[in-house]
Image (cartoon, helix red, strand yellow):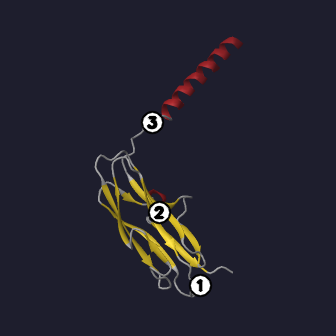
Amino acid sequence: MKRLLNIIYVAAAVCSIGFVSAGCTPEMEPLDSPFLYIKDADGGSSLNVDAEANNYTTSLYVSTVARRMEEPFTVTFRAIVGGGLKEGVDFRIKQGLEGTLTFQPGITRQPIHIVWSRNSSLDSAADNTLTIEIVSVSNPEFTIGYLSLGDENKYRTYTFTRVKSN
């Protein structure tokens, strides 16, 4: 009798493992919703830049998550400059205030470089932000940002804040 119970337990365990594993391995769909986003090299979406920093280059990256695209596409971005900052005085974006990045087939990341200049007279009460925003992408298959995280602007923008050191 004990042997029969052991056989039943083993058979039940094997069957339940089969049912569970069959139910836990749904057929996976390939990534079919390509998206792109902007982050720094550390994965952040914002950075404070000291007003005393001079000739300091920061780099952002527009990256794609997608299958290999067969045709090139372009991404358009713009800079939104707070009233306390001035291009050419506080910073310079190597691609300009409004720019495009071209992604050739196989390329998944493109940089945007910002060079900061010293500004000892920074007004701490002013809006000292520089926001880089992805505006559009020429390939309509792409979504901009991480929409699946519930915040439609997540990683669509990157914000620098110029601060005075204490």
Residue at 39% of width from left, 74% of height from top? 97
Q: Quick one: label 3 or label 1, which is nearer the N terminus?
A: 3
SS type, badge 3: loop
Residue at 38% of width from left, 72% of height from top? 96
Residue behind mark 2: 155
Residue at 47% of width from left, 85% of height from top? 83
Q: Find residue 125 and report its horizontal and vertical position in percent.
A: 57, 88
In the displayed structure image, the side of residue 166 where residue 50 appears, left or right: left
Is any atom of residue 32 visible in this view?
yes
Q: Are marks 3 and 1 in contact (CB under 8 Å)?
A: no
Q: Label 2 sits on what residue type?
A: Tyr
Residue at 58% of width from left, 73% of height from top? 49
Q: Nearer the viewer, residue 59 or 81?
A: 59
Q: Nearer the viewer, residue 53 or 84?
A: 53
In the displayed structure image, the side of residue 36 where residue 85 appears, left or right: right
Q: Label 1 sits on what residue type?
A: Ser
Residue furthest toward the right?
A: 2
Residue behind mark 1: 120
Q: Quick one: label 2 or label 1, which is nearer the N terminus?
A: 1
| On screen, residue 63 above or below 51 | above
Q: Dot 2: few (<14), some (14–19), or many (≥20) neighbours within 10 Å?
A: many
Is any atom of residue 1 visible in this view?
no
In the displayed structure image, the side of residue 35 where residue 7 appears, left or right: right
Structural distance between the alpha carbons of marks 2 and 3? 30 Å
Residue behind mark 3: 26
Q: Find residue 150 and report its horizontal and vertical position in percent.
A: 47, 61
User: Which quadrant holds residue 161?
Assistant: bottom right
SS type, badge 1: loop
| On screen, residue 102 above or below 90 | above
Q: Label 3 sits on what residue type?
A: Pro
